[in-house]
Image (tube, grey):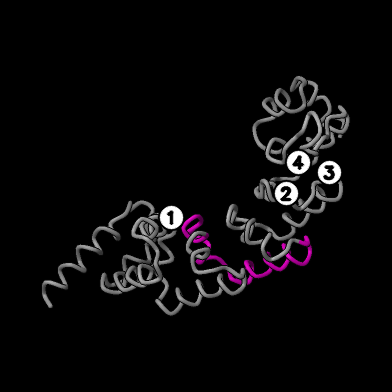
Amino acid sequence: MPARSRSRSKTGASLLFWNSRRSCEVLLYEPLENLQVRVDYLLSKRFSPEAVTRILSNAPLFLAFRVNSMDYRLGFLQRVLSLSGAEVRHVVTRYPKLPTCKLHSIECNAFSIKEEMGFTVDEMKQLIMVCPKLLISSRDNIVKAFTYLHKEAGLSHAQLMQFPAILRTRECIYKPRHEFLVRLGRAQYDPKEPNYVSPKALVTGVDAVFCENVAKTSVDKYNEFLRTL
């Protein structure tokens, strides 16, 4: 028994001594044995040691949950998002704070992605596998972004899925840029046609880069356009 105890302590040491500046103060009041039990739980759920280390480094609060709460939250994600076990591990490792967020907000956003935006379950899964933060973004903002980009700019569901983070982009980015491209006759989002503008190109980069690479004009002209809005 003593030898086994030493082995467990060594395992705990390798996983629990992360950057103290990023740790959650509430963990200071937890017995080390309790923390080790929670680490062991994650390992039992087939999270790799590297994934566990990433989770604890980026979302130490998750370790403050009791094992039954951790299990419930992971199960909630699997059920509400129709994920496999491997997909749950992928999403949580990609965005470790997700299981610590308000579950009601996650459920509401998942509902909106499917029912209000019209993505299928499989499409929703693809969106969140790439951009889990869609689940904790403002529901109103992502629905508003979808409505404009889909109905006004004419981007299809498939096109939006090419760059899911576009749904988290601020309106002050995607709306004036699209309108500017319309003004220039460059709002061309069909990949089969010349001068194609990808969803990512539309919303990423500073204005100067957007103007040079996408609008093919000077940022001064874009700034002049913005003053007319």
Q: Where does the image place residue 187, in percent across and percent down from the top left?
A: 83, 34
Residue density around tag 1, few if under 14, some if 14–19, many if 20 or more, within 10 Å = some
- Tags 3 and 4 touching, CB below 8 Å: yes
The quarter of the rendered structure image containing the C terminus is: top right
Residue hosting label 2: 160
Q: Mark 3 against mark 1, which lies toward the viewer?
A: 3
Name the amino acid, label 4: Tyr
Specify which label sits upstream in the sequence, 4 or 2.
2
Q: What's the amino acid at mark 1?
A: Asn
Q: Residues within 10 Å of mark 3 (few under 14, many from 20)?
A: some
Q: Is residue 55 left or right of residue 213?
A: left
Residue drawn at the location 69% of the way across and 25% of the way down: 208
Say if the magenta span includes residue 129.
no
Query: Which residue has dot 1 on it?
Result: 58
Q: Give the residue drawn at x 59%, y 74%.
A: 79
Could you tell which of marks 3 and 1 lies nearer the N-terminus?
1
What residue sits right under mark 4 in the picture? 174
Of the two numbered discs 3 and 4 on the same chain, state the one appearing first in sequence.
3
In the rendered view of the protein, which quadrant contains the N terminus? bottom left
CA distance separating discs 2 and 1: 28 Å
Closer-to-camera residue (170/192): 192
Q: How many neighbours does mark 2 have within 10 angstroms: few (below 14), some (14-19), or many (20 or more)?
A: some
Q: Main secondary structure of the magenta part?
A: helix
What's the CA distance linking mark 3 and mark 1?
A: 36 Å
Q: Quadrant of residue 12?
A: bottom left
| Highlighted magenta segment, given as a residue range | 91-118
